[in-house]
């Protein structure tokens, strides 16, 4: 009897796993139209479809699918992937009260990116407020390092970033983001990130 119960529990657990992040990624031909998913999908829907999911800057779903995309593109084999960027507002105490009140209704935010590699360049498209945004880059670069901020909740990171110059460093990119000089800015698009958290966080 115990063996039967154990087997039933194992089967139920397996089915639940299939319904979440571990479901095999759908082929591009099976994808629903990007505008439709941008308008109607929830985070749960995206996970069920096997999309890569980045929640508040960290990969939580689809890691295997992402690695497959990285492997194919590194061999210059055309491929596509969809990556969801999902943001929550976090702790209200981290904000000025007036500012928090002005933005709280905008969260959570979710953007579904479609990254298409044609063997030479990467094209990224997503919908935001009914408008289609598109950009192209030459390289997908992996940056690894320690947290730049001692107050961060994570200790180290691995980021995959689209750029047009594969010689630029992550520090170069961050300098361009924070610099007041417009000419210091380096076009980039962070697509995927995997963070290692400090003990007691996440």
Image (cartoon, rainbow, N blue to C red):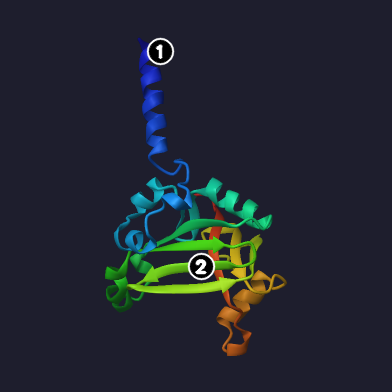
Q: Where does residue 118 sit, x and y in percent of width and height?
A: 59, 62
Tell me residue 21's x, y (percent). Answer: 44, 44
Residue at left 55%, top 52%?
Answer: 66
In this rendering, position of residue 129 left or right of residue 115: left
The kind of secondary structure element at disc 1 is helix
**Residue furthest to the top:** 1
Say which residue appears at 55% left-offset and 46% top-offset.
Answer: 64
Image position of 48 with respect to 194: above or below: above
Residue 193 appearing in the image: yes
How crowded is the residue under tag 2: few (<14 C-alpha within 10 Å), some, or many (20+)? many
Between 3 and 76, the one lying in front of the other is 76
Which mark, residue 124? 2
User: Which residue in the structure is indicated by mark 1?
Assistant: 3
How far is the residue under mark 1 from the one under mark 2?
Answer: 50 Å
Quadrant in which the N terminus is drawn: top left
The answer to which image quadrant residue 142 occupies is bottom right
Seen in the picture, residue 122 relative to 174 is either above or below; the reply is above
Of residue 117 and residue 160, the one placed in the foreground of this image is 117
Residue 114 image point, x, y percent = 47, 62
For residue 142, side relative to residue 198 (left or right): right
The image quarter containing residue 34 is bottom left
The residue closer to the viewer here, 10 or 73, is 73
């Amino acid at each position: 009897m115990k063996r039967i119960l154990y087997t039933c529990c194992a089967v139920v657990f397996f089915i639940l796993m299939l319904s979440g992040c571990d479901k095999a990624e759908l082929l591009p031909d099976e994808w629903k139209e990007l505008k439709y998913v941008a308008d109607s999908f929830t985070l749960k829907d995206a996970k069920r479809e096997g999309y890569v999911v980045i929640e508040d800057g960290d990969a939580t779903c689809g890691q295997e699918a992402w690695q497959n995309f990285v492997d194919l593109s590194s061999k210059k084999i055309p491929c596509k992937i969809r990556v969801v960027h999902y943001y929550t507002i976090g702790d209200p105490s981290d904000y000025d009260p007036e500012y928090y009140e002005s933005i709280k209704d905008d969260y959570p935010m979710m953007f579904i990116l479609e990254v298409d590699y044609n063997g030479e360049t990467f094209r990224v498209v997503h919908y935001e407020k009914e408008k289609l945004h598109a950009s192209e880059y030459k390289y997908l670069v992996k940056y690894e390092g320690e947290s730049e901020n001692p107050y961060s909740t994570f200790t180290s990171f691995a980021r995959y970033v689209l750029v047009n110059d594969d010689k630029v460093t992550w520090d170069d990119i961050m300098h361009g983001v924070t610099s007041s000089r417009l000419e210091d800015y380096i076009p980039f698009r962070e697509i995927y990130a995997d963070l290692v958290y400090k003990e007691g966080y996440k």
